[in-house]
Amino acid sequence: MTVYNFSAGPAVLPTPVLEQAQSEFTDYQGSGMSVMELSHRSSFFDAIIKDAKKRLRELMNIPDNYHILFLQGGASLQFSMVPLNLAQNKKALYVNTGSWSKKAIGAAKMLDNVAVEVIASSEEDNFTYIPDITPDMIDQDAAYLHITTNNTIVGTAFQTIPDAGKVPIVADMSSNILANDYNVEDFGIIYAGAQKNIGPAGLTVVIIRDDLLGLCEVNEPMLDYKIHTEANSLYNTPPTFAIYIAQLVFKWLQDLGGLPEILKQDQEKAQLLYDAIEKSSIFTSPVRQDSRSITNIPFVTGDEELDKKFNAEALAAGFENLKGHRSVGGMRASLYNAFPKEGVTALVAFMEKFEKENG
Ligand code: PMP
């Protein structure tokens, strides 16, 4: 049975990448060792990490005044590192668009010297839309404005990045990095857990503008962006195998035609599913039309029992991890870059069949 993996993360990876990793698993390019066994200071690994950074820079058009860091601790550690580095004794602005934004806000609030202000929220409407952010809402003395560009659980995404004036925008881009047409220069910091569009869990990518380094007033080297930047992400042992897989994923994306091509494919996949939902008499999208994510697409029948039945039958038919997040229920299809279009076509056909039988 063909299995389609709709997981929100860790998520589907490109088959050619897995196959290449398999073929060099025990002997990386004649080294006689697995990538996992290589020293992070070896010339082999040095070539891997440099190539991974170069490819990511090319893919995202990252200007020279931005640094790429490969860290650990997940996006969740960034919830604390961002305010620790940037907002000591300053105001930090947040937009609350879902559970992950709330966690970021919560982590900042735990710090004594950070004044957190939530400037907009869609919580009153179950986070079903992205609030408008206008320049007059942004205190120009603030340390940063934090947004979650794609809200993995509720399926919303910023369609455009707000104008924050001179206040740097810090973006949690965990679930739509490499699947958007944002401009890196609109951000001060971009961070993302790798386990959706980049590679295996264990790696966190941080892209940080030069002028935001050296502001950390906390004497803790592992939490200081400047220290990691100066050490080229080798201050301590990095997640070497995850970086290697990320390198292969970046190469896969470039060979495909880069972001413009993958974005076209992502939009087509999303459109197929949204069209099916629109057409359906039993499935609906809980998300406001102008705020919809092309990456994480929730849908519901409005009847918990029917959702349960759909999820059980879908699972039996090979549609893995379609069940919505435990906090919202229903269904959610995560259509990351490596998710094949055939999987969406198959899901749509399955939904139509289910509707005929249960409508
Ligand atoms: N932010 C977003 C938008 C996420 O989707 C997730 C994980 N699903 C996180 C943060 C947390 O990431 P991690 O588990 O890497 O800490």
Image (tube, rainbow, N blue to C red):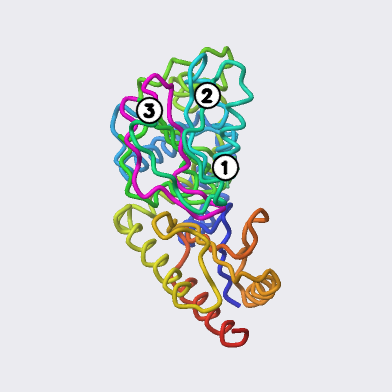
Neighbourhood count class around disc 3 (C-alpha, 10 Å): few under 14, some 14–19, many 20 upward: many
Q: Main secondary structure of the magenta part?
A: loop
Q: Which residue occupies the foreground of this view, 147 or 202?
A: 147
Residue at numbered disc 2: 83
Q: Which residues are magenta?
A: 139-166
Farthest residue, direction bottom: 357
Horizontal side of 127 relative to 138 (left or right) equals right
Residue in view at x 35 percent, y 20 percent: 211
The residues tagged by marks 1 and 3 sit, at their Cα atoms, a distance apart of: 20 Å
CB atoms at circles 2 and 3 under 8 Å apart?
no
Q: Which of the two discs, 1 and 3, labels the residue nearer the N terminus?
A: 1
Residue 147 magenta-highlighted: yes
Residue at numbered disc 1: 100
**Number of residue marks:** 3
Q: Position of residue 292 (x, y in %)?
A: 43, 57
Residue at numbered disc 3: 168
Q: Which residue occupies the foreground of this view, 283 or 225?
A: 283
> Could you tell me the amino acid type at mark 3?
Pro
Q: Position of residue 197 (x, y in %)?
A: 47, 51
Q: Quadrant of ligand 1?
A: top right
Quadrant including the C terminus: bottom right
Q: Is residue 182 above or below residue 166?
A: below
Res. 17 mark: none
Q: Which residue occupies the foreground of this view, 236 or 94?
A: 94
Q: Is mark 1 within 8 Å of ligand 1?
A: yes
Q: Which of the two discs, 2 and 3, labels the residue nearer the N terminus?
A: 2
